[in-house]
Amino acid sequence: MKFIGQRLFHSLFVLWAVVTILFLMFRLMPGNPLAAYISEALSEEDQASIMRQFGLDRPLWEQYFIYLGNLLRGELGLSFHQRTPVWEIVMSVFPNTLVLVATGLIVAYIFGIIAGAFLAWKRGTWIEAVTIPVVLGTRAAPELWVGMVLLAILSFNLGWFPSGGANSAGAFYDSELQRFLSPDFLAHLALPALTLALYLQGIPLLLMRSTMLDVMHEDFVTMARMKGLSEWRIVIRHAARNALLPVVTAFAISFGQIVGGNVVVETVFSWPGLGRLLVAAVSNSDYPLAQGAFLLVSVVLVVMNFVADVIYTLLDPRVSHARVA
Amino acid sequence: MPASLESTAAVPAPSRRSRFLRTLARAAAVPGRDPFAIVGLTIYLVFLLVALFADHLASRDPLEILFQANGRLARNLPPSSDFLLGTTHLGRDIYSQLIYGTRAALIVGVTAAIAVMIIGTLVGLVSGYFGGWIDSLLMRLADIALSIPFLPFVIVLTAFLRPSTWNIVLAVAILLWPNTARVIRSQVLTVRERAYVEAARVTGAGNGRILFVHVAPNILPLSFLYGSIAIGWAILTEASVSFLGFGDPDVVSWGYMLQDAFVSQALSRGSYHWFVPPGICIVLVVVAGFFVSRGYEEVLFPKLRD
């Protein structure tokens, strides 16, 4: 518990630091943050009144504390372009990102865990010699390019999948859940999720393989062998179960990273999510919106890193057995 | 912990120079033993030659707008003997763009890798050697840098500063040094306790001398390992950032080509000759980095080789 408390404090400290960097980035960068708002046509007085309205006439430290106070109350300001609260805009697209990331990750991890365990079992054979370079190749392929190739072949050429967006125009659903389960949504989800899964499967695969190789040398596996258990049973029941821990931790960390790293996939498939919103907001100089989207992505990243820490302490048998031994 | 470094410590007082030379010799002998490293280094060499001789290999200026004999714009042409990979929507030669893209990719990759190596190695050395509050401070900084969403940060920074290759390199360096620093630091922690470092300290060598003359040579191979991974990361990042429209508008890179193809409807037109080659080039360079680092990793961490 003490350890978890320490990690929690550490996460809060990191979150505060990131929030501060974000503030400084958006205030100290060259260019007036209100350039999109204030036009040359406005009189000096009008310009000054807008500056006052946004609190930009006050000293920087005062602005900083107002900003921190607003964040604690969940107040992210108004979007320059849409003139609606940032919080509402960000939250309206966040579920789309979560569904896409979760689908891609789950597919990638199920495939990666099975294939990784299989490859560890086949250590030193030609199967390994062929597969490892291919897996490294998928790690090296830019997501945007994989997405483009899939789009060109499966969508434009064969017409099996829609070419972008999350829903066909005019579709209406009673609830979000109903929308997520509709065949139309799933057809739109397939290609971006596949792109994400192709890119991500290498992490659990390589991790599973290397921890399996480590575990296979431990005493309890030798013991199981001596008991005469079948090789398959040893791999599944004894080795794989113990090799899963680092993979579960990696899942949590990946989840945090992909929510922020998803900008590219969402742009290729015009997926209405957080990443695409961020890119659009930065391009349009919609600073409050960009800052809000960036902030949400950072919070997810820090929270998932914390979750990974907690999972690791709670689940690792070696952490709890070490004292007994 | 690398077993080979442990065993060098057991040998009674090997001279510093011979130890350093031995590390280098071990590193240089890798390609002979590891087929992955041979492939990786060969790919690097080919791309390096292409980048160096781009002016001779490319048949045209990558941004020149070309016309056909009948005076019409040479747009969206399929591959032919005249245009090896066809032309773009604006009538530019795709093959020449691909050749010049190699140069852009290597410049981004190598400068980012050098920056990451230098920052990561210095921070790791100082942090691991001095410990105490300096160590705490630097490692907290590393934690913070690792908690900033990577691509969003690069996009915002390049958009604010000015879309240019150097700002992409800057952003990559700011966020990527902690990985290297952490590994170097943990290595320094073990090297610091070795007998020859103790001996140097007893003979009155200063901190700076011990750090750079006695400790640093032992961890240099690790810096190169992490540097070669950073090359691929930087190239992938440049491609993503250019694709999202925040790249240097004056530099023809593989990311620029992919973006150009994407927004010019090359996908629906099925112009595979346009958007497939740049992707393959990116995969090859990044994979080469993985192969080289994998080969070197096996020499640096012999445990993996059992």
Image (cartoon, coloured by chain):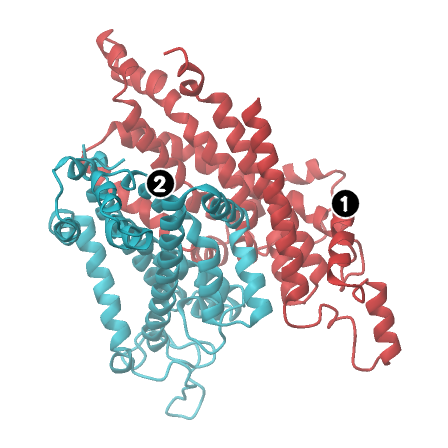
Chain colours: A red, B cyan
| Residue B270 spot, x, y in % from top left | 43, 65
Mark 1 packing: few (<14 Cα in 10 Å), some, or many (20+)? few
| Residue B158 spot, x, y in % from top left | 54, 66
Left-right relation of A186 to A37:
left
Residue A311's place in the image compared with A22, above or below, is above
Report which residue position mark 2 lands on: B186
What SS does tag 2 mark? helix
Return the residue nearer the eye: B94 or B192.
B192
| Residue B25 spot, x, y in % from top left | 13, 52
User: Are labels 2 and 1 assigned to the same chain?
Assistant: no
Residue visible at 34% across and 75% down in the picture: B100
Report which residue position mark 1 lands on: A74
Q: Using the rendered view, name the quadrant where residue A250 is placed.
A: top left
- Residue A76 visible in rendering: yes
**Label 2, label 1: how far apart the Cα atoms are:** 40 Å
Q: Chain of mark 2?
A: B
Quarter of the image that includes the C terminus of chain B:
top left
Residue visible at 81% across and 63% down in the picture: A54
Kind of residue sitting beneath label 1: Gly
Frontmost of labels 2 and 1 is 2
